[in-house]
Amino acid sequence: MIYVSKYLEEEELKVLKDSADDIKDIDFLNKLLDKYYSVFPDTNRMNLSQKINCFKITKEVDKIRNNYSHHDNLKYVTYYLLKGLNEKREEKIKVINNIFDIKKYYDDKLKNSPIEVVKNSKESFVKSRLNDLIMNINPQIKKEKKAKKEDNEEERENNDDEGKKEKSSLVFTHKIKEIIDAIHFGLSSKTPLILEGDYGQGKISAIEYYAKMAKLELVQVHISKSTKVDDLLSKTTFKKNEKGNFSLVNSKTPLCHAIECVDNFPNKLVVLEGINNATPAVLEILNSIYGKKGTNILLPNGSKIVKGNMNLISIFNPSDDFTREKLPGNLLNNSLYYIVEDPSKNDIKKIILYLFKEADLDNKEQEDFSKNFLEAQKIAKEGVGEFPITLHEVRKYIAFRKAIPKLDKTIFMTFIFNYHFSQKENIYKAQKELKLDTFLFNPIINYNGDKKYLTFKSAKKGKSNQIKIEIKNPDKIVTKKLINKFNSMTLTEKLCFLFLICCVIAKKTPIIQGMTASGKSFIIKLLAEVLGQDLSIYQLNANSGLSIFTGQSIMKEEFDDKEKEKLKKILKLLKIYYGV
């Protein structure tokens, strides 16, 4: 092992001269950094690789922000690189803006999006309303739309007025505008972006909004602890030809194709979700993907691809086990790193108010939901081992209410808040504080005469809520047997059963958590029987990969006729050889 000491000041200056346009740029950057660190002395210092990245990004910004001086662009780049790593910015943002002399900012005066679509006769581009940075929209998209319009003259384009009138369900809070601004800065300057933050802060919503504005196709890659390099880049599968012979076939993934893109304005936006879950092997590949254009990336089969132009955003959800310091240096040094902050109470109320109004739900319901949301969020934060209450719960609630409007809204709030918790003490605390378990619940089920519909009533007597759900295979229904099975369940199990039915109607994917032998499998199997549906069960563990769902790991139960004939010939030859 050889110890290599860090660069001396004179040596670092020589290295930076190769990246900076002028020695004056290095002096200018160092003065900005000294001014910033004098106010925030505990902040990590920008290292040599990050300074080189700063100059590299500035050269890109000079091309698209050419109405401003080079030093003004360098100042903006430094501002974004440092601001993104500054935690609890809301308390410090005015000070940070003063340090860099930032005049325009997303305050109350900028009530809508910080970006707009601008069109002229030659091109379309996304432009920042804050710093005039632009990102070109791929001209090929316009040609494809024109060709499509010629094929069908009746088709009208719906997106001609984005720059004038933006229609979005996104609520432009201060923090959402910050995320959109960071995305625009990263993509317009061809800088990979890493968004760090907890679940439910609006990161994906902001990315989807930007992709829609910039006409970018989203390529979302979910990284779990079982994700392999093959899953990311290239799958090697067995393919049988017409003669029945097998051969190995390598098929590139959408991510692989996006990496190889050579277009000046790529029309895909790659989003790597959960890079904190990546294994060392996957992190090594991500390290290469975050490298500069022209980097060779090794595929699982031994061949190489060359990195071209790509729009790249990664999402990092930190935990006690994995902090940003454990990410490879290339990811941190070659990217714009941006810490996303949790929405404030006022932001949450503003978002709930907007979404409820959009869904035509009344003010009283909105106020009740907001109150319960904030109380449940507090219980989740104070509780140990609980998944946080996020803004995703708002959309879940609205989806239930719109799909099943006649069911008591208190039942949906119970699903979303009370039974969000896994620890008994937190469930009891939520029941006590939120007072949601007040509805009458003694349910019954029944079928109509031809068994084409199932009726679920929340109570036998009194004013009850009723749900009607279509049965796909009435011939499978044995009415008396299924009703008896349902009646044998406890009230908690019946509530879970109702939850699953609501998820089916609202087209939401349910997750049931509980101890072994607590009745989860029984409820799911009974649900399939009651609805006359076939049931497919997959046993998953920590080592399960995507192949279990794609069918690549499933053996056929029987050989086909050609395979049987081939086996017979082989057996016949073996008998002749061995003289049997």
Image (cartoon, helix red, strand yellow):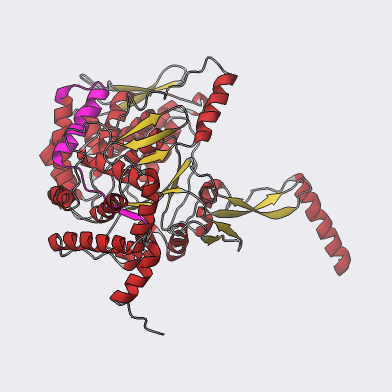
Q: Is residue 194 left or right of residue 344?
A: right
The answer to whether residue 364 of the structure is visible from this angle is: yes
How many numbered discs sit on the rendered protein?
Answer: 0
Q: Position of residue 435 (x, y in %)?
A: 12, 35
- Quadrant of the image for the C terminus? bottom right
Span shown in magenta: 335-364
Q: What residue do we see at 41% from left, 18% from top?
A: 448
Give yes or no for residue 49 being in the magenta stretch.
no
Query: Seen from this angle, which residue lies furthest bottom?
Result: 1
- Is 215 situated above or below 88? above
Tell me what residue is drawn at x 64 percent, y 49 percent.
556
- Which is more toward the observer, 121 or 389? 121
For image coordinates 21% across by 31% down, the residue present is: 111
Measured as percent of width and height from the top left, residue 175 is found at 22, 42
> Is 506 situated left or right of 42 in this image?
right
| Residue nearer the viewer, 212 or 546 | 212
Residue 352 lies, with reference to residue 388, above or below; the image says above
Residue 115 is left or right of residue 482, and the answer is: left
**Residue 412: x, y in percent?**
25, 32
Residue 502 in the figure: left or right of residue 311: left
Tell me what residue is drawn at x 29 percent, y 57 percent.
318
Q: Is residue 487 visible?
A: no
For the N terminus, the image quarter is: bottom left
Name the spot of residue 336 as percent of width and height, x first: 33, 54
Single out the residue that lies furthest toward the top: 154
| Quadrant of the image occupied by residue 305 | bottom right
Say which of 139 and 454 sits in front: 139
